Image (tube, helix red, strand yellow):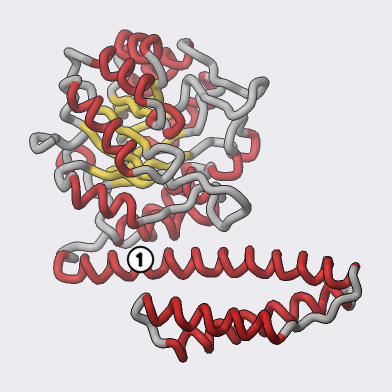
């Protein structure tokens, strides 16, 4: 994919690319009110979901094709480009017929090669810009495969959207950033524009600004952010949407760095360290939850907390593994001792009935 072209040029939109609008098109009034406010703040690309894939049936699944008429009214009144998500052939055909300017393929769809190929076949012969979100699972090859299918259909105005990856359990982020994956994507496909979706990545309004800054610091080409005229009343994903006023404030506080080539590699490495540290903390939190379960078991069976033979085995085995992996055995012993001390403290709390 050596002849990729930008979905929009910096001269047309500016830097970074900013795409904004509500998660879902809910009513014509909601769409136009939001779009007018965003246009006043200089946003040039408006997004809204018309068809909404939901995890379970019975939820709001979008207004359907009537929403395309609302988007075209936005385009006519504000001059903004308009884009929406497509998940199958009929979506593509309806969007192209309506005159939509840009399309994106969602995370659930990009994980399904059959669905992506159906979309690709429907796009053949057109030149509409297409953005492909990463699959829900952290599979770089699957992401690249989806991009290749669209490219092979003749779509060379192509971009990737990084929205994070789904993992089991409770975490700070709705979808884990795993920045090393889009970094590797950029290395493999250097001509591909990459857009960050901090709304879906964070899942919370307060995480949009820091995630946006991280993405720009790593050289991402743009941001796609969910903005709603009345987020608290949104029919989908209200906790991750912000008003146009808040969006404007965030955009004005972001630092867009120039001439960062000399420090780019260092910044990327530091971002990877930050992510690994976050992962370590979450893993340690899981370990402590298991320690509390062990404490409860020992309490019910009237067992003592510390078993020295078990602890000695842990120290020896962890030291040995660390040394095999090129680390200091003394360093690892210090880490294991600290973890063991906290585990004992957690179990004592269980025994004393102080845990919730």
Q: Residue at the location (32% across, 33% down)?
A: 132
Q: Residue at the location (47% across, 42% down)?
A: 244
Residue 14, relative to residue 142: is it above or below? below
Q: Measured from the top left, where is residue 43 in percent x and y?
A: 34, 39
State the count of labels: 1
Q: Measured from the top left, where is residue 24 in percent x and y?
A: 51, 28
Give whichever of 32, 266 is nearer the camera.
266
Q: Measured from the top left, where is residue 62 in percent x and y?
A: 54, 20
Q: Residue at the location (22% across, 30% down)?
A: 148
Report whether 322 appears left or right of 217: right
- Quadrant of the snapshot with the C terminus: bottom right
Q: Measured from the top left, where is residue 26 in percent x and y?
A: 56, 23
Give whichever of 288, 223 is nearer the camera.
288
Tag 1 residue: 271
Residue 291, relative to residue 186: is it above or below? below
Report whether 236 appears left or right of 25: right
In the image, farthest residue toward the left: 3
> Which structural element holds mark 1?
helix
Residue 19, relative to residue 101: is it above or below? below
Report whether 347 appears left or right of 247: right
Q: Residue at the location (52% across, 36% down)?
A: 228
Is disc 1 surrounded by few (<14), some (14 to 19) or many (20+) residues within 10 Å?
A: some
């Amino acid at each position: 994919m050596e002849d990729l072209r930008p979905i929009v040029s910096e001269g047309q939109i500016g830097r970074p690319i900013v795409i904004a609008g509500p998660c879902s098109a809910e009513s014509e009034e909601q769409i136009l009110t939001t779009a007018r406010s965003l246009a006043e703040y200089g946003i040039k690309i408006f997004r809204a979901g018309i068809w909404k894939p939901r995890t379970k049936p019975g939820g709001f699944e979008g207004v359907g094709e009537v929403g395309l008429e609302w988007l075209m009214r936005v385009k006519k009144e504000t001059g903004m480009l308009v884009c929406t998500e497509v998940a199958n052939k009929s979506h593509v055909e309806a969007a192209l017929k309506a005159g939509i300017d840009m399309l994106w393929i969602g995370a659930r769809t990009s994980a399904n090669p059959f669905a992506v190929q159906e979309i690709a076949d429907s796009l053949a012969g057109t030149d509409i810009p297409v953005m492909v979100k990463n699959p829900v699972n952290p599979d770089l090859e699957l992401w690249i495969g989806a991009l290749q299918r669209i490219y092979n259909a003749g779509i060379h105005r192509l971009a990737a959207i990084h929205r994070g990856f789904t993992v089991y359990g409770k975490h700070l982020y709705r979808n884990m950033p795993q920045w090393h994956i889009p970094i590797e994507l950029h290395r493999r496909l250097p001509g591909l524009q990459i857009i960050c979706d901090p709304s879906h990545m964070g899942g919370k309004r307060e995480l949009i600004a820091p995630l946006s800054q991280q993405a720009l610091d790593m050289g991402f080409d743009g941001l796609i952010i969910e903005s709603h005229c009345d987020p608290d009343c949104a029919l989908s994903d209200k906790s991750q949407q912000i008003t146009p006023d808040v969006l404007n404030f965030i955009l004005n506080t972001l630092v867009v760095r120039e001439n960062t080539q000399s420090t780019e590699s260092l910044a990327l490495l530091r971002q990877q360290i930050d992510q690994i540290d976050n992962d370590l903390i979450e893993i340690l939190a899981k370990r402590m939850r298991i320690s509390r379960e062990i404490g409860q078991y020992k309490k019910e069976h009237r067992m003592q907390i510390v078993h020295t033979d078990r602890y000695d085995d842990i120290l020896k085995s962890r030291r040995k593994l660390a040394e095999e992996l090129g680390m200091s055995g003394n360093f690892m012993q210090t880490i294991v001792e600290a973890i063991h001390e906290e585990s004992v403290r957690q179990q004592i709390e269980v025994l004393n009935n102080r845990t919730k």
